[in-house]
Amino acid sequence: MDTDRDGMGDICDDDIDGDGKRNSADNCPKAYNPKQEDSDRDGVGDLCDNCPKRYNPKQKDSDGDEVGDVCSSKSDSDGDGRQDDRDNCPYVANAGQLDTDKDGVGDACDPDKDNDGVPNKVDNCELRWNPNQADRDRDGLGDVCDTDFDGDGAEDWRDNCPRNGQIRKSDFSNFSRVALDPEGTSQRDPEWEVLNNGAEIFQKHNSDPGLAIGNDKVEGLDFEGTFFVKAAARDDDFVGFVFGYVSNRKFYFASWKRQEQNLLGSLIRLKPTATSGVLLKLVNSQTGPGTMLRNSLWNDASKQGQTKLLWQDRAKKGWEFNTAYRWKLLHRPEIGLIRFRLFRGQVLEADSGNLFDFTIKGGRMGVYCFSQALITWSNLKYSCNDEIPRDIYSQLSPETRRKVKPSNNNWLS
């Protein structure tokens, strides 16, 4: 890891975030905050404090939603996974919490996103300050945003999120480890290694269920990657990926089992049985990480209070060792659309068809494994996208089409 991207790894950098404060004296050693604001005087800077107005030096966050337990609330008026008093648009869903002008009002509900005095509706560069609205080529885009709409230094043609100044490219370098069954010692937790400038992840062990989750939050999402399991692993368990991660109790995931198998040593009344094949599930767990969630992840079927099966491939074909599989995932929370496709080379292995679920409005992305060793996920790529590919748009109902904008590209070909 190299948080401040100065060429020196965090493990040997005495100023990890590059804010001029040595780690030992920095109240947010991994977040750039040279002013060291600490409103509640708990020793944790406001910028990295999960309860900046409540004294909580231990920063306990049981559900992993980035809000500390002492100030956690179930009040979420817009259902975007951010509680109202920590949501910069409490009545408009915006899981990404993008706030371009840093005025405390999220872009999703800010009438002037760049604070230049020109309302968004008539601003020819709504994310970049340009009160004079200069547009020399008269193309409708202001001069300051002609080639870089969000002003993040990455030209639009190579920017994964050209309307989001917080994201330029896919990067899992600074990720979070999420243990989904921290109880007991029957299996160790996954051991993750990030490679190739954040585009590749390797997991070594036959492990408890776990996730490696990137830091970027996205609403409309395109997510793709390749996974490969070495034959030396000699096992037949789960490999997959995650999207819409809100907390360790709430996320979507795709999972692929190589062979049918019962989970041993678990609660008999759950009868956790996994068949071979790929599936998509929603985790909406009342208990969070532990035995109940572990068994529900293993079981194909929906489990009340834990998981919901969204789709399962009827072929129930297992994955093979030493074989590269590529997935493509489309998620448009505005209309609840989820579409998943899986390839082996040019061969289509599985297609979920258009699925609709409105539970999660967006979130973080990552990878998932359960009891499977020697997995590599490579060429990981995610991008922000609210438009609907032309060929999928044509499959939607007239009522749904009126809510979204089609793109000029096809997704199925």
Image: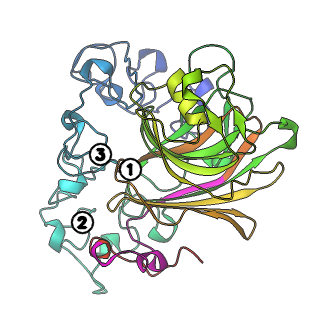
Q: Secondary structure at mark 3?
A: loop
Residue 349 image-quadrant placement:
bottom right
The C terminus: image quadrant: bottom right
Q: Secondary structure at mark 1?
A: loop
Above or below, 13 relative to 357: above
**Dot 2 surroundings within 10 Å: few (below 14), some, or many (20 or more)?**
many
What distance separates the C-alpha of mark 2 from that of mark 1?
A: 23 Å
Above or below, 83 relative to 228: above
Image coords of residue 160 (percent x, y): 49, 61
Q: In this figure, which residue is indicated by the disc labeled 1?
A: 362
Instruction: Give the residue furthest to the bottom.
Output: 138
Type of amino acid at the residue the image marks with label 1? Gly
Q: Residue at x 30, y 46 (%)?
A: 97
**Dot 3 surroundings within 10 Å: few (below 14), some, or many (20 or more)?**
many
The N terminus: image quadrant: top right
* Magenta-tinted stretch: 379-399
Q: Is residue 1 visible?
A: no
Comparing labels 2 and 1, the label whose residue is closer to the camera? 1
What distance separates the C-alpha of mark 1 from that of mark 3?
A: 7 Å
- For marks 1 and 3 on the same chain, the one whose residue lies earlier in the sequence: 3
Q: In this figure, which residue is indicated by the disc labeled 2?
A: 126
Residue 124 image-quadrant placement:
bottom left
The reply to whether dot 3 and dot 2 touch (C-beta < 8 Å) is no
- For marks 2 and 1 on the same chain, the one whose residue lies earlier in the sequence: 2
**Dot 1 surroundings within 10 Å: few (below 14), some, or many (20 or more)?**
many
Q: In this figure, which residue is indicated by the disc labeled 3?
A: 80
